[in-house]
Amino acid sequence: MTTAELTPNSFRNQPDHRGHFGQFGGRYVAETLMPLVLDLEREYRAAKQDPAFAAQFDDLLEHYVGRPSPLYYAERLTEEVRKNAPAGKGAQIWFKRDELNHTGAHKINNCIGQILLAISMGKTRIIAETGAGQHGVATATVCARFGLPCFIYMGAKDIERQQPNVFRMRLLGAEVIPVTSGAGTLKDAMNEGLRDWVANVHDTFYIIGTAAGPHPYPELVRDFQSVIGKEARAQMLSRINRLPDLLVAAIGGGSNAIGLFHPFLDDKDVQMLGIEAAGHGLEKEHAASLAGGRPGILHGNKTYLLQDDDGQIAEAHSISAGLDYPGIGPEHSWLKEIGRVRYDSVTDTEALAAFQLLCRTEGIIPALEPAHAIAAVEREAKKMDRDQIILANLCGRGDKDIFTVAEALGTKI
Amino acid sequence: MSRLSTAFSKPHPALVAFITAGDGDTAANLDALVAGGADVIELGMPFTDPMADGPAIQEANIRSLNAGTTTADIFALASAFRKRHPDTPLVLMGYANPMTIRGGDWFASECNKAGVDGVICVDIPPEEDPELGPDLRSAGIDLIRLATPTTDTARLPAVLNGASGFLYYVSVAGITGLQVAAQTSIDEAVARLKAHTDLPIAVGFGVRTPEQAANIARVADGVVVGSAIVELVAQHGVNAAGPVRDYVASLKSAIISARG
């Protein structure tokens, strides 16, 4: 059984021909980039129709990335949550194990797709931005695999807190370029990536790491990441012959979440919950653009942004470098506005507790990003009946975060 | 005739001078630009994320925002300038978000009230024109579009459709203030653009020396200088007006003699 056919009222036929998801998305870039963005769209349309492109993508995902990733019933976590739930409550918790991918996160799915596009466009130089370093590692990995020079822009502050990933990128042959402008985090790295791109349009391909940026990036990143939801949907049906009641995923830019959600959007009985990072709390510093922001234009798209009354962009905060961004992919803004997906948030403290809970109950060290989703799963499961099913995306593993977590727990390693 | 049309109808090409609003003593620096002979003023609206700008203008944006500059302050600067200089055209240049956050209609109406003549928005290409273009046009504000080395002949009509005031040719594919394009490529580009439009063509990005300004003035209708002036403001702080006036005057005399 495959996903439902597209109908005119489908939630899966966005964006429109101008790259808009309702009022969101679009192509808000400097004129220098516009012709290239239009080229990329043409190239992507052709690739989407090309069976050879799909075959190469699928082959690499299977034999290089290690897909399909397992679908796993987290029995001990489910039991643990039931202990604190009202009688008869405590939904079954399942995980899509994208942390088992090569390079340790879902990011590689998208990088494989984009580097194939870069090669077919004849581009010979790859750039990317990274926050936590997971997208940087995944980009450096595919560049090594295909023999292309790789330049990664990374905020100076993130370089400091993500040293293991910086070293990984360098081992893989990438040049990591520290960005000191602004607060030295993901937003500033993206600005610097765009500045490089505008100066090197003739030979450079920009591998954007999340489902954001100018059209067609939000669409193509979503499509490449949709392998998560397509596999999960088929696996659920073959394992227990039913679909989950609730999907949960963490959201920074939102690529793992849209990858999980999109293939289920027309399954009307499947509810979805996206979890933003509430940092120190929504009334303090946080990274929850939907909860605490409003629509605006940044980095090529219109979407919810953390900003002041004059439209100056605010600095985000999250313990998770991968969620530390003041915007969100435009399709999430649209899904929020039409009410198809519910969005909520989880604080640093709640995510740290969920991180430890998963370590102890399931023997899985999650990344801090999906730890946010796990905290929400715990919350939701207690409200749901025991025969109901939650499927959460375990989008990354926590090896990269052990130093951050140790520091937060007051342990020196 | 609009102030911009008048500025581009002088016997010599126009000197278009840029500074960032709220960086240093902006009112004094604006007066210095006029005193030095600038024909058109571009007043930069600071933004936290100036993706198309090089280090000089990035830092000017940060200095301005750190000093607390608001959009209301920028319109106040523009209004006051208009009272002091009734004839010098003033163009606001910046990024989409600060311009559209209260709605394009609000922004166009504020421009109108402040006596702003035109708007350059870096990250609203023709494809996203509905965001701001219709509001500016109905308020009688010129929307100045950018053409670049990557804007090919097939795309030019889209760029020109809805453009007015002048056409800003960004002579290098890159960010502001770093390198200057080869003169031959500027000559070719201006000739190509002139075949498609009657709008005046001003050339900018990386122009620093009077010699470069003169070379561009031989072929184009205007020369845009930004980062080099902004660097003087950075260097001299609140006492930049004198050096800015002298530098602008040196550019102006080179431009006038270029067509001599």
Image: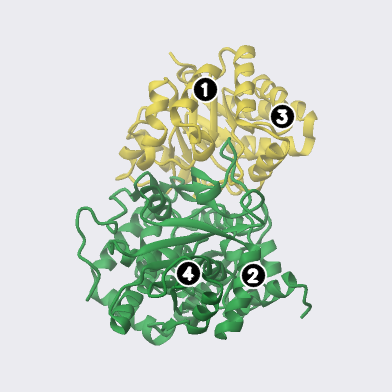
Chain colours: A green, B yellow
Identify whether A279 is placed above or below A138: above
Any part of residue B207 in sight: yes
What amino acid type should be assigned to the residue bearing mark 2?
Leu
Within-10-Å neighbours for mark 3: few <14, some 14–19, many 20+? many
Camera-side mark, 3 or 1:
1
SS category of the residue bearing label 2: helix
Disc 2/disc 1 C-alpha distance (Å): 48 Å
**Residue B60: image tag:** none
Disc 2/disc 4 C-alpha distance (Å): 18 Å
Q: Tell me the residue that label 3 is attached to.
A: B244
What amino acid type should be assigned to the residue bearing mark 3?
Val
What amino acid type should be assigned to the residue bearing mark 1?
Glu
Query: Same chain for marks 2 and 4?
Result: yes
> Badge 3 sits on which subunit?
B
Kindly indicate the quadrant of the structure image that contains residue B92.
top right
Front residue (pair B66, B92): B66
Whichever of callouts 3 and 1 sits on the residue coming sooner in the sequence is 1
Q: Tell me the residue that label 4 is attached to.
A: A381
Within-10-Å neighbours for mark 2: few <14, some 14–19, many 20+? some
Camera-side mark, 2 or 4:
4
Camera-side mark, 2 or 1:
2
Q: Tell me the residue that label 1 is attached to.
A: B110
SS category of the residue bearing label 3: helix
**Residue at point 37%, 65% (across, down):** A261
Identify whether A224 is placed above or below B154: below
Q: Position of residue A160 (x, y in %)?
A: 71, 68
Disc 2/disc 3 C-alpha distance (Å): 54 Å
Please indicate whether residue A21 sits to the left or right of residue A200 in the image: left
Disc 1/disc 4 C-alpha distance (Å): 51 Å
Any part of residue A56 in sight: no
